[in-house]
Image (tube, rainbow, N blue to C red):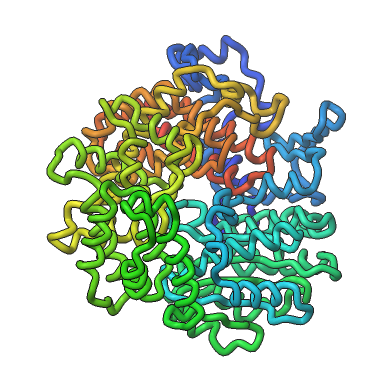
Amino acid sequence: MASCLKELGRIEEAVTASQEAVNITQRQGELDVSSEEANAPGKIVAFTSEEAAHDDAVATDPVVTRNEFVELLDHASVPAPVGTHGGNVRQNIFNTVGTGNSSNWNISGDYITQTVEDTVTKISRMLPYAEDASWDPQLTCIPGTRLAMLAAIDAWARQIGADKICWIKGVAGSGKSAILHTIARRLKSEGLLASSFFFNRDTTSCNTLKTLFTTIARDLANLHADTAEDIAKALAAEPALVSASLSRQFDALILGPSRHLPADRQVVLMIDALDGSVRHDRHVELLMILRDKITQLPPQLRILITSRPTSTIEEHLSGCSHIAIHSIDIFSVENKRDIDFYVDAQLRDEIILLRLGLTSADEIVIRNLKRLAEGLFVWIVTVCNWLRTAYKPKSKLQALLSNTSQPCSLPEQKMDQLYTAILAECGDWEDADFVQDYTLVMGAIMAAKRPLSLAALRALLDGTQELDPQELLCRFGSVLIGFSELHRPILILHISFRDFITDRAAHDNRTKRFYLSKREHSSRLAVLCIKTVNRELAEPIAGTGYLAKDPRDPPLGIPRISGVSEQLTYACIHWTDHLADVEGPHMIQSHIIPFVTRHFLAWIEVVTSIDVFRGSSIIRQWLQQHAPESERHFQYRLQASAMRALGHRLGDAARLEEALLATQEAADLYQALVPEMLAG
């Protein structure tokens, strides 16, 4: 029933249906059970005394008989519809208005809360936001380059009646993203940037279409009060919009609300690396929206996009009258002039001259580098970064010039040649210690679901003997940025480097030593993450423990948890993502047992407070498949009650998709207890 309601978009009713499926102790009139009845034969107790005494134990539920248990599970599978806000509800309602900063209606055990809060906060609580998707001032164009294109786009952004979409297209490494970061900085300073979303395969939240329009909607809500009110009304009327199709989200959260934006000021939405989200012919819904629906936006709102000219994108967007196209021709006079400008500036820089042992610029070297760049900005930027960080850069430069004398037919081949040359000189590949450290550190960076800072990386690798990540990463300064600062995310300079060492390097005998298996290192990260969770959750964290309280007692909803380190944040959110890549139990089994027996509830509390609850059943499923002998440590009763309490709290917080997931997990756990309870 719940799944059917969810498919129909009736999320509130789906949550209620699932809650009824596990509401085995809260039927009106059946809650008072005497201690004598509780100890009578045929009664089922929610926890054993040992479990109840456990530090992580959830408040015990009242007891029910076996017959009541079976009857309620059977009854709960086909619940009668429950009215939504403003409708008739068949059960008794107890209004607790005036008991705090919220209004709470008790509908026979199901709780609907109206909290006094501002509209933007309410929207932020309901819509997921891709935190790392915004523009970055450190990734803008090199000063003095791209002047003509930047001027053209700047004029388009301000022009009344301009085309609804401006599309910048070019091959990988041609500098599209840098142009968008530069325009974003300009527009932001003048209040003309509505939202920016940079797709990034290195970051989970930025590598999915699911957070695109929810992120943009939250940004639009911050622009204008009436826009925010429209978005809030849409979500109140249809909570399923949180996870609806892109087309439905666009209509309800972007198209309608944007009509309230002030008409006297142009504002721009940005989407970078569109090709990163459209990887297959079936991922074309966004392209269809850009092609067919964007013209319905108010005239003051327009969209700037970038992509590689893939066949699928070309098929949908080329030829549209509302799309202005700016192509980056890497062989154009303008592009050559920009690269020449950059090479001249870099090779005449005092630091590089000093490192090359020169007193003045070598014009022959400058001329050769300009020629060898072949229009690829990322190539020449990587080379110049290398010259600033390499040991004996002069010999490295001479080797590079001699080994890349022949032009490459594809940008990918050209970058692979450069990466091969750079990596070969980054360390002694015959030194087992260097290779081991490269494998551990670079493997973690490549397998991480989002960029980690040096501080978090060090903490995750805690216990690895004599390993200093920063000392190793300094050797890779031409392809990585951010490691010089303790709390700044470590970023890959260009996605082509990641693709090279996690894929293409494996297919050539000369480059196999550089290859890193993402699956292998993801499984290693699973171990590092769960060790971090066990270690740091062993210490008290302010705000945890709320699942041990009755979800009906204030404060309702999900309490705020503070004092969570970056490494614990990452480990709590992503360790189950990495667990999916662990094939053998020997690596992680010994760490999972203390986790499920001591830290499971605190983990759930931290994840739900700081991020989105995505479920916990993968842990049980993994144990059943890979380590069935360890499943006996899984505390079904404890976790079923916790999931039930979590479902109520998420419902109070209007996080209905998560509430449905938690309540469905509770139902599954209670169902798994049926044989044990009937046998008792």
Q: With respect to residue 167, does 566 lie above or below?
A: above
Q: Residue at x 81, y 57 (%)?
A: 224
- At which x and y percent is residue 271? 58, 66
Q: Is residue 512 visible?
A: yes
Please state if 29 lies on the left or on the right of 566 as rendered. right
Residue 4 in view (yes/no): no
Q: Nearer the viewer, residue 80 or 7?
A: 7
Q: Is residue 192 above or below residue 107?
A: below
Residue at the spot 79% in from the left edge and 48% down from the top edge: 119
* x, y percent for residue 115: 78, 38
Q: Nearer the viewer, residue 31 or 22?
A: 22
Residue 372 shown left or right of residue 25 in the figure: left
Q: Residue at (43%, 36%) from the top-left corner?
A: 454
Q: Residue sitting at 69 percent across and 81 percent down?
A: 163
Image x and y of residue 59, in percent: 57, 20
Disc tally is 0
Instruction: Say which quadrant the C terminus sits in.
Output: top left
